[in-house]
Image (cartoon, rainbow, N blue to C red):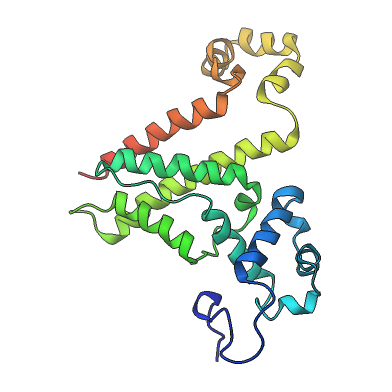
Amino acid sequence: MDRPPIWLRPERAARGPRPAHSRDEIAAAAVRVADAEGLAAVSMRRVATELGTGTTSLYRYVDGKDELFDLMVDRAMGDGRPPVPTGNWRVDLAAVAHAQRAIMLRHPWLVRLPATRPVLGPNTLAWLEATYAAVDVPGLDADEVLAQAATLLTFVRGHALEELTEREAGSTMADWLTKQSQRYAEQVIGSGVYPHLSRMMIEAETPHAADRFDRLFARSLEHVLTGLAAGRG
């Protein structure tokens, strides 16, 4: 018989000594390691060291690393509560998107975990409920609600991943553009073969702006929401 998920198991056994640590303390320790050193640094041994306990003792709380990751994700998602609904689906979804991006930027390792293994802890469920509540209106079937919510959340995750990748690389788009040969850029533009690309290279301001990711996220989010609006009838 399969062991029930951690969310269905009591934190403290009916019998036996009181646990030395709570699941929340374990999750907090693991999150501290991941925030400071990256996801690769998180191991049962490393978290046990952070807590000042033995590695084997952690298995009294979690079955392994996958469950540890589940606790970490739910702990990180508890950094903020879902925005209070306004009744305006577009405003509410935008608030969810901005809040989730902020959480991902505070905890860069979140975007490195596979999105195919959903975490169903209480904090994560609260965010899913808020997202579905904003999308769900009379006339939309459940599959369309799922598709629209997935579109929004995939956009947020992808944008955060791109932003974090640039940050971790230690160079910006402006740095990259500066390093490129001016002569080559002139050849690309002067060739006439790439008129649309050339226009972007000459006229676009966002790639050079210090707040380019904030600008790009806000503008792209508006396009996503406009696209969702078209599917709402």
Asked if 27 appears above or below 150 in the picture, the reply is: below
Asked if 27 appears above or below 62 in the picture, the reply is: above
The residue that appears at 52% across and 28% down in the rendered structure is: 214
From the viewer's perspective, is 130 left or right of 39?
left
Q: Looking at the figure, which quarter contains the C terminus?
A: top left
Q: Nearer the viewer, residue 227 or 12?
A: 12
Q: Nearer the viewer, residue 225 or 39?
A: 39
Q: Looking at the figure, which quarter contains the N terminus?
A: bottom right
What is the x, y in percent for residue 152?
Answer: 42, 45
**Quadrant hosting residue 201:** top right
What is the x, y in percent for residue 86?
Answer: 27, 43
Q: Nearer the viewer, residue 29 or 150?
A: 29
**Quadrant hosting residue 206:** top right
What is the x, y in percent for residue 20?
Answer: 69, 76
What is the x, y in percent for residue 141?
Answer: 24, 59
Asked if 163 appears above or below 96 in the picture, the reply is: above
Q: Nearer the viewer, residue 11 or 135?
A: 11
The residue that appears at 54% across and 39% down in the rendered structure is: 159
From the viewer's perspective, is 178 left or right of 148?
right
**Quadrant hosting residue 224:** top left
The residue that appears at 30% across and 46% down in the rendered structure is: 85
